[in-house]
Amino acid sequence: MYPMITLYKVFKMKRTIAILLVVIMALALFACSKDDAASTSPSPSASDTPASTAPSSAPPPPANASGGTIGYLTDDVNHFDRDPFKLAYICFSMGSPFTKAIVDSIEKFGEVLNYTLYAFDADQDYDKYISQLYTLAEQGYDGFILGTDDVLAERTYEIGQELGISYVAESTAYVDKAGKCIWPSVAQDQYANGAASMNWLIDNYTKYWGEIDKSKLGLIVLTFTPVSGIHEREPGAREAFEKAFPEAAKNYFMADIVTTPSGFSVAGGDELVSGIIPAHPEIEHWLITAPLEAYALGSVRATEHLGKEDCTLICSFGSDALVAYWDSGYDGNWAACIPIAPYMYAIPMVTAVIAMHNGSVDRDALWAKFRAPGDVNTMFQVPYEVVTQSTYKEFMARYSLEAWRDEIVNALSQ
């Protein structure tokens, strides 16, 4: 877990009210995509016994000469000795539960760090997004959190340089043509995410099916090629599958959401999976990875009406819907997911923007110890792990605000 901000004295401040950052595990990586996942639960068909994978880790932040931390808000600052900062969060679409949860987390954290938040939904309109960024900058907003896709990342980077504003990218990092990060960003290692989801399926499929003919095993990776924050997971999953099952390498199928009329929806996932499985009767067992919960639920529905629940195993990104199903007793073939707590995005994004705006850190020093070789600035990588019905509650407790705050206090005392 990453120490992101020293809150010990902040949480003791008289003006700070109690904060409950609700850990809504959500549509993990494409935080600004539109999802209309339905609320009905798939039918149970299997039991869940495997354990989760180990979480990612990172070194502690570097200390500066004054005893604080470079690029982080320190606990010797009373943020209520100034007027509230005005922050804006602009997103291409706020249709997903994950994006809405990020907004809620940022808003609640303003009660600790003394800022107001204006959240703007561009409703998938590029012109509206860009126009609003210019408008808010002209209105004197102090900092911007910009949820983008590949197209918007390039344009908003240019506007940020033009206007000289304090801003940070959410989910889709600011990178150059060589893939090097050129401005502070908060995202995940998507290739590693794809590999992690596939490795969980590889490690656990026998617990559901026993020993099988691996030459008759297939893989479907649902993806969305226009957005690198989603599509970078595809090679991670595919390469892990090909390494583990060379005899089944020919049984790999990439299902691109852009090819279905239903698009970002449960129906889109259903249509793609329903088209692939019946076309390949020679494949007896299927592994499926889904980049959003809508596609995972669509995959479940496809396997149900195809009568393939018992020979398919699904791992998704995001957990908002799946956790609700688990809580209601579901134990079907949608067996695992990679959840993301929204405040794990919200906190580093907010602290970075405020630190850059108030001059307490130069962007070149921000998160310097986490910087990848060759990067100009740092992409702060949010940690990840795979959880199941038997492990998700432990994950939620471990990544609660209270547990996270205690880790910060312990780190400060060492």
Image: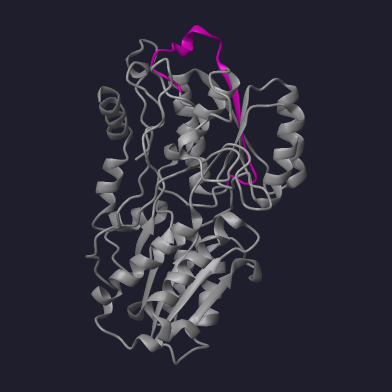
Is 345 located above or below residue 49 in the figure? above
Where's residue 78, x and y in %? 44, 11
**Nearest the eye: 182 or 310:** 182
Which percent across, then down, holds residue 316?
43, 61
What is the magenta range? 73-94
Residue drawn at (35%, 69%) of the image: 201
Judged from this view, the residue extending furthest toward the top is 81
Instruction: Compare residues 167 and 134 and report the one nearer the observer.
Output: 167
Position in image of residue 20 (x %, y %): 36, 30
In x, y percent, where is residue 71? 49, 27
Q: Is residue 153 above or below residue 293?
A: above
Image position of 124 (left or right of 284): right
Pick the quarter of the image with the C terminus.
top left
Q: Is residue 162 left or right of residue 321?
A: right
Question: Which image quarter holds the N terminus?
Answer: top left
281 and 239: which is toward the camera: 239
The answer to whether residue 44 of the structure is visible from this angle is: no
Instruction: Report the side of 36 relative to 318 (left or right).
Output: right
Question: What residue is shown at x 38% (from left), y 59% (from top)?
Answer: 337
Inspect this view and state whether residue 159 appears: yes
Q: Quadrant of residue 199?
A: bottom left
- Relative vertical location of residue 109 with respect to residue 190 in this rendering, above or below: above
| Residue 353 quadrant | top right
Identified at 23% across, 57% down, the residue is 390
Q: Up-down: is 264 above or below 269?
A: above
Queried whether the magenta region covers residue 141, the answer comes back as no
Q: Residue at (41%, 51%) from the top-left corner? A: 320
